[in-house]
């Protein structure tokens, strides 16, 4: 369906509503951005492992993962390469819900969560961010299972709410595609892009794009 509103008009609208972080522009597409190849996933051998500073480590099969309580989420997402996408619809499992309902119990010393993805991609956030309700382990986008390029069968997402732009959020690289494990840690462990020179925190509202120094050109 052709979008009845021009990109520029939509961008003006979100700007006026204070939903466009500094230096970003609105895209009506859904760009695919990652380093390396897209993995092929066999759901019969796929697992998600939760390890590190938790009372009990757990490994879910795809079938077990799909028994967990589910959540839908409407988010604005912001890529550090300057595109933002608005009102994206996701469905999946909320880490905050898993902790509140006792499926995972972090040890008191746990302060960071590392997402471990296929081919060794990692990304880090404070535990508090990953437990907040704008962070989701997503299996579906706009009512459909994720496509391989967008992270099938499971990815993390972090974004901002239309009406709560002050909520703590991060650029979209902190949403790991092809997620296979979550590690709870006391100390931080900068991930793939963070070590390549992206900002360790990556708040789009503060325009924390690069840490300076060792930035490697990506594209
Ligand atoms: N495993 C993995 N996840 C990743 C990346 C990556 O290189 N590998 N890139 C990140 C970046 S920079 C962005 S902007 C988003 C892009 O998600 P999309 O391709 O679904 O738009 O995925 C993030 N997750
Ligand atoms: Mo990105």
Image (cartoon, rainbow, N blue to C red):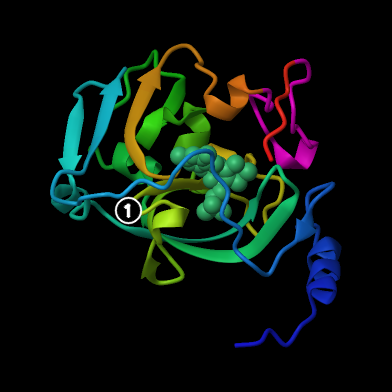
Q: Secondary structure at mark 1?
A: loop
Total count of labels:
1
Identify residue for label 1: 153
Q: Position of residue 186 (x, y in %)?
A: 43, 12
Q: Quadrant of the C terminus?
A: top right
- Residue nearer the viewer, 147 or 186: 147
In the rendered structure, the answer to whether residue 27 lies left or right of residue 111 reads right
Q: Determine if the magenta segment contains residue 203.
A: yes
Q: Position of residue 190 (x, y in %)?
A: 54, 19
Q: Quadrant of the N terminus?
A: bottom right
Q: Which residue corresponds to the image point at 68% horizontal and 23% vertical from the top-left?
A: 197
Q: Which residue corresponds to the image point at 38% horizontal and 70% vertical from the top-left?
A: 144
In the rendered structure, the answer to whether residue 14 lies left or right of residue 74 reads right
Q: Position of residue 189 (x, y in %)?
A: 50, 16
Q: Which residue corresponds to the image point at 41% horizontal and 47% vertical from the top-left?
A: 38
User: Magenta region: which residues?
Assistant: 197-213
Q: Which residue corresponds to the image point at 38% horizontal and 44% vertical from the top-left?
A: 178
């Amino acid at each position: 369906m052709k979008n009845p509103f021009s990109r520029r008009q939509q961008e003006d609208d979100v700007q006026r509503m204070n939903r466009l972080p500094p230096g970003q522009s609105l895209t009506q597409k859904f760009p695919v951005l990652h380093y390396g190849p897209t993995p092929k996933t066999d759901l019969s051998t796929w697992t998600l492992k939760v390890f590190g500073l938790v009372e009990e480590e757990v490994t879910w099969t795809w079938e077990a993962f799909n028994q967990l309580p589910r959540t839908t989420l409407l988010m604005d997402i912001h890529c550090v390469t300057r595109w933002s996408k608005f009102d994206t619809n996701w469905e999946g499992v909320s880490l905050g819900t898993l902790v509140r309902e006792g499926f995972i119990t972090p040890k008191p010393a746990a302060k960071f969560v590392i997402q471990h993805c296929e081919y060794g991609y990692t990304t880090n956030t404070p535990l508090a961010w990953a437990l907040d309700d704008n962070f989701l382990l997503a299996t579906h986008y706009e009512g459909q299972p994720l496509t391989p390029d967008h992270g099938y069968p499971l990815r993390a997402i972090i974004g901002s709410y239309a009406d709560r732009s002050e909520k703590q959020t991060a650029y979209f690289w902190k949403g790991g595609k092809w997620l296979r494990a979550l590690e709870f840690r006391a100390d931080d462990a900068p991930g793939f892009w963070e070590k390549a020179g992206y900002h360790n925190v990556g708040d789009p509202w503060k325009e924390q794009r690069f840490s300076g120094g060792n930035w490697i050109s990506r594209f």
